[in-house]
Image (tube, helix red, strand yellow):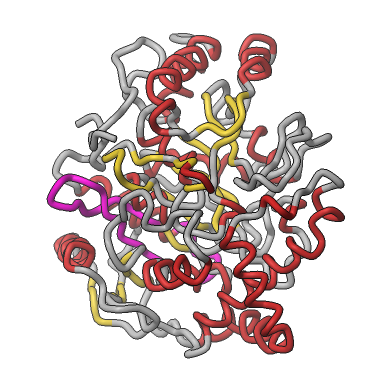
Amino acid sequence: MEQSRLHAFTDDDALGRGDATEVAERISRGEISPTEALEAALARLDSVDEVLGGLRFEDFDRARHRATVAAPRGAFGGVPSAIKDNVTFSGMAVTMGSEALPTSPQGSHGPFVRQFLDTGLNPIGTTTCPPFGWTATTERVHGDVTRNPWHTAYSSGGSSGGSASLVAAGVLPIAHANDGGGSIRIPAAACGLVGLKASRGRMLGDPTTAHMPVDIVCNGVVARSVRDVARFFEAAERTHKNPAMPSIAGVDGAPARRLRIGMILDSPFAPATDVATRTAVEEAARQLEALGHEVEPYEPAVSKHFASDFVDYWSMIAWAIVANGKREFGPDFDKARLDPLTLGLAKRYSRRLHRTPLVVGRLRDSARLYEKRFGDVDLVMSPVLTHTTPEIGYLSADLTSEEHMSRLVPYASFTPLHNACGAPAISLPLGQTDDGRPIGVMLSARTGQDRRLLEIAFELEAAQPLGRFARVDD
């Protein structure tokens, strides 16, 4: 297909070019109605999604009902949004990007979906993801792909690439995403968005991940502004506030003191970071130093076994899907329609099953190791990914499992640590390739210090030349 930039931003009176906070404020003031905001989003979806492929299942009728019947409530009352196709959303199918799962609707909301809806967001449907969220792109078998609005020949990242594609393109101001190995931060990096993988336990979970021996999945959002992300987590606290977590409420600007920030440029588990990505991190470091922060080299606190342990853990989950699919997903689960990567991971685990206690034990211990070795820095800065966003097909769902993993593991080697140890990390769109595609830079912190990440994100956002991050329609 023709390689091009594609967006749905218009000068309509409803969504305009504003973020979710601005749309919510306009609804609250009575300048626009929830119905007007919703219909603008649906019109935008219609204009671009045939190419982008970000929406999995429509929920237009119920969205219209919510917009017309229910009074706006919550921080984002009446703002159109979407929920990723891998959490329990009553009345909607959960296929997790796989052709093997049944399309029967769920009977009730999971805890996170209730928390999400309590913020007032109005989902228009569910967004695409790759099969079971294993990979760093949103491509499914037989060429069913989700494209990047910055350059439609390229990946939108994964696994929350459907949400990221629609938000970056201007269809929605904010959308659900979740992260089990980088799946918020990677699509945020690919699509020029802000994406926070919060501390473990800050958000409610979902039945689909409730029984994991190591809880690696965190729910959140992707958005075009730092304030939208901060406001979402603040609103979510009104439904569920983990007493072990410092509150995010009220964060809206720079940290009160100058910070000491450790910088990593290369992953210990991958080839050297490419030039464009390295440059983006180094330029962000210079920006932080210009703001008065101290940046110094940093050695990551990670076991030499971590990469293989994390892949073993994913393989264990894949094996459970293959072995227990009908019990977990119902009698219509069709093992014959599983994708090559899921089947390959499951086969890998069958050869390494004896390692399970060791793998689970070391991953559980990663939190202690991370906190112990964090050192005297306040934050750590690194790339999100080792190289710039690949073209569609580089991580195709039709590849053999071996070829897929040989490309995926060296590409996505920075993000999984935070899932295993439960620490927060945020992707910020601080760099660009020569042809204008976004490059994400990641900042991470000790567990519970999500607020500090948002504060530095506010400061960096304000320091950009235009006072905001680049947008696809600029």
Question: In the rendered image, which quarter is residue 344 located in?
Answer: bottom right
Query: Is 126 placed left or right of 100 in the picture?
Result: left
Q: Is residue 473 magenta?
A: no
Q: Position of residue 46 (x, y in %)?
A: 44, 18
Query: Is 457 placed left or right of 219 in the picture?
Result: left
Question: Closer to the camera, 100 or 226?
Answer: 100
Q: Position of residue 4 (x, y in %)?
A: 23, 34
Q: Residue at x 67, y 33 (%)?
A: 118
Q: Residue at x 47, y 90 (%)?
A: 304
Question: In the rendered image, which quarter is residue 441 located in?
Answer: bottom left
Which contiguous range is marked in magenta? 427-451
Question: Closer to the camera, 6 or 394?
Answer: 394
Tell me if I can see residue 472 in this picture. yes
Q: Position of residue 6 (x, y in %)?
A: 29, 30
Q: Position of residue 101 (x, y in %)?
A: 72, 46
Q: Is residue 449 magenta?
A: yes
Tell me if I can see residue 184 in this picture. no
Question: Closer to the camera, 191 or 314?
Answer: 314
171 is higher (above) or lower (below) than 239: above
202 is higher (above) or lower (below) than 101: below
Q: How many marks?
A: 0
Q: Residue at x 25, y 82 (%)?
A: 297
280 is higher (above) or lower (below) than 193: below
Quadrant in the picture for the C terminus:
top left
Question: In the rendered image, which quarter is residue 425 located in?
Answer: bottom left
Quadrant in the picture for the N terminus:
top left
